[in-house]
Structures are given as structure tokens and as C-alpha cells.
Amino acid sequence: MPCRTRTRCRSWRAANVEGKGAVGLPDLVKATLRMRPDRVVVGECRGEEVADLLRALNSGHRGSFTTVHADSVSRVPGRLIALGLLAGLEPRATAMLADGAFDVLLHLERGSQCRRIAQIGMVQCVDGRLCGRVVAQWSGTGDAVAGEAWSDFVAQWKERGSGGGA
């Protein structure tokens, strides 16, 4: 992402030959939050930075996003829980933070020509357990198929659009 006048780009740095000077993603997320940004974008969440990112997404940084590698929408919760464990978060704490952090999940698949959206989903905490619900999916050859959760998903987006959401 090219830097713009009101954009501050940060990147990690490996340690030098003396083992000093490393700047990891958790450090970058914390430093970014100190700048009181409107948006937080983490290119790929793959370690302990998930804890700081989840806290940021629950503290008013709307429109923020990240990528997480998972095989499907239903596998995202397990991936978040595993990343949370790396950060020292209990699974229930990760579930509660993730429930309020993500408005939508987009699962991409690599096709022969390009990547495409294969699933749209949402993450929810049910009885302290994190679940990923597919609300729509595409096979890549036909029309999209809306799932049972589609009406709940649309209602949540309408509520947010009218100012009723967090």
C-alpha cells in the first residue's frame, strides 16, 4: 500500500547480527494504536499480534481489516483461537473479543485465472464458543447461494448503517 499524506505505513524489521533492533508485528500494532488512528490495517495476522489487533478492533477503530489464513469461514474461529493462545489469551477471551471485532468474513479461493470470493460469513460467540457462520457462498460457476444466516447478516448491516450499531 503506497503511503499517502495522512497514512502512516509501518513494517517489521528483523534483528541485526547482534540480535538487537528487531521490530515485530505486535510492536507495530501497539505503536500504531498509540497514534490514535481511524483505521488499523494489518496485512496478515499470524501470531501474537492478534491480541492487540482484537483489542483495537473492539475500541472504536471501525473499518479496519486484516487477513487470516484459514481453509473456510468455519475454520476462522479455530485459527483465531490458536493465534490467541500464542498471545497468552484464553480461548473464551479470544472468542469474546473476536465476536465484537469482525463485521464480515470474506473467504477467497484461488481459481485458474484469479482469486474469487467463495464465501461470505460472520463470526459469533455462542455460549463462550466462537463459531463461523457462512451466510452466502459461490461455487464459481453459478449464482450465489444465500444461507440460513443471510437474513441475520443483512439485519445487522442495516442496523449499523442506520447508526444503531457500535
Image (tube, rainbow, N blue to C red):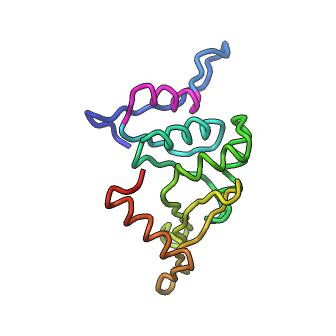
Instruction: Pinpoint residue 82: horizontal percent, then vertical percent.
Output: 73, 47
Question: Which residue: 63% across, 15% down?
Answer: 20
Foreground residue, 61 or 119? 61
Picture residue at 61% right of the left edge, 64% below the top: 73
**Residue, x 33% and y 36% (percent of image)?**
3
x then y, percent, for residue 24: 59, 29
Residue extending furthest toward the top: 18
Task: Read off the magenta span.
Answer: 24-37
Name the quadrant of the N terminus: top left
- Displayed quadrant of residue 137: bottom right
Total numbered circles: 0
- Where does the image place residue 49, in percent across and percent down from the top left? 60, 36
Above or below — where is 134 with respect to 60? Answer: below
Can you say whether 38 is above or below 103 in the image? above
For the point 55% across and 79% down, the residue is 147
- In the image, 2 versus 67, the foreground residue is 67
Does the stretch in magenta take in 26?
yes
